[in-house]
Image (spheres, grey):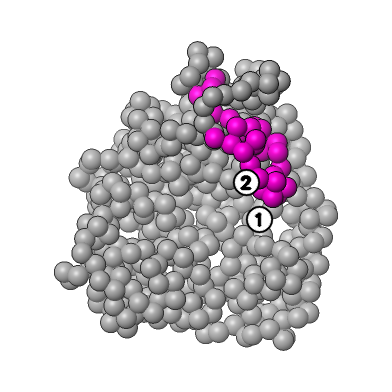
Amino acid sequence: MDHEQAPVLDALADYDRRDRYGFTPPGHKHGRGVDEATLRVLGPDVFRSDVLAIAGLDDRGSTGQVLSRAQELMADAVGAQHAFFSTCGSSLSVKAAMLAVAGGQEDGLLVGRDAHKSVIAGLVLSGMRPIWVRPRWDEQRHLAHPPAPADVAAALDASPGAAGLLITSPTPYGTCADLAAIVQVCHERDKPVIVDEAWGAHLPFHKDLPTWAMDAGADICVVSVHKMGAGLEQGSVFHLQGKLIDIDRLQACSDLLSTTSPNVLLYAAIDGWRRHMMRAGRRLLDDALGLVDRVRSRIDQMPGLEVMERQLLGQQASHDLDRLQVVIDLEALGISGYTAADWLRAERALDVGLSDHRRIAAQFSFADNDETAERLIRGLADLVAMAPGLPRAPQVRIPPPRSFELERVMLPRDTFFGAVRSVPAPAAVGCIAAEQITPYPPGIPVVLPGERITRDVLDYLSDGVSAGMVIPDAADPELKNIRVNMSR
């Protein structure tokens, strides 16, 4: 296929070149209705390009098949059979994939318990029963890794009626499952595999990156182009192959959840990024991997900082690692990841991808260069110098891994939509949670609707909040009160 084409991007350029005008939404009419203050911040070009998608820039309002051609080019670029663009982020895309595989089935879906909160939202909306596959756990460093093939096989043996598997790889820490072996385990039982690969949009474009889900044989993978690619926020793509998933059903499930007013700027950015990667992706990622190797080495030489790499790989850890995610352990520095992230943001105008009780992670992409790397190096050097005057890392009571395996008493949907009450946190021990409690980032829930709250987990969350952990989806982010089911 001719990857010099960018059908959506070209159609948008043609729209502007012909000076088309619509007596249609959007109501700002190419920015004419936008006030000057807003235009100064966002720029007039944003509004000039924000046009109605069905005005010939997707496939609903014309016979040009603009979007279809762009999606065919994307599928060809990454070696999938089909690709579908989404403008509602991978949070929507993963829900649609879940519905396509397991919607309406009583036997449930195998789900890695390190799933993102969007997956849990899918369970609530659909009413499906999750069958948890527990992640591997580093007890020394208190870090979860993706499940191993043997864990998936054991779960399928225990629940042979499960509709399929949903697994997250890479994780926000860059750790990756042995996808090829996991897919083999599932396909031997005719079970489809959904990979939440939101952090892996770049993987198909360089051989030295972890295995791309389609190359591993997965049936569906969902990527967030804005995370490790060059799309706009909310740009996502489904990739599909094989015969275990009905393509028409997947499209119908996506349509159930999608907006009828997609933002064509997101389509165009995805389209342009695919062309960019086909033109120069290997070279750009070569440069990025070389840069990040140098950055890792320099950070690792700073007193009190440890760049995690070999610690993230191994039998009880992960199969592979995306080295563009630079995970830095701060335990020897004596401050928490929360404190470090707050200081870097406030004092050096630097944002890191995630933070926890002892780590921060800096995400690199092919867009980074020596200049941006130096900003991080200088910021971290300053952090090391200032660390003695910063608050010491508070004690966070982290229970043994088994303590995080909470008893599920009710389905997430039944609990979430059932009668609830708010109780003081100490009184919630032994009650059934009616809300998600999710440290963010990275957005992996600790407590789900329908699970019985334990003292160990409540102590961990309470200590975390005191240390700087952010829990945005709870009704009370300070966790002084927790919503629980009234009947249990």
Q: Where is residue 419 in the image (x, y as percent from the top left)?
A: 20, 64
User: Circle 2: is it few (<14), some (14-19), or many (20+) Cα within 10 Å?
Assistant: many
Residue 47 forms part of the magenta stretch: yes
Q: In which quarter of the image is residue 115?
A: bottom left
User: Compared with residue 361, is residue 215 higher up or lower down, i.e. above or below?
Assistant: above
What mark, if any, has residue 228 been given in the picture?
A: 2
Q: Where is residue 290 in the image (x, y as percent from the top left)?
A: 77, 49
Mark 2 and mark 1 in contact (Cβ < 8 Å)?
A: yes
User: Compared with residue 406, is residue 77 higher up or lower down, i.e. above or below?
Assistant: above
The C terminus: image quadrant: bottom left
Q: Name the residue under label 1.
A: 363
User: Compared with residue 1, is residue 267 higher up or lower down, i.e. above or below?
Assistant: below
Q: Nearer the viewer, residue 84 or 418?
A: 418
* Element marked by disc 2: helix
Range covered by the magenta-colored residues? 27-56
Q: Residue at x 50, y 64 (%)?
A: 440
User: Circle 1: is it few (<14), some (14-19), or many (20+) Cα within 10 Å?
Assistant: many
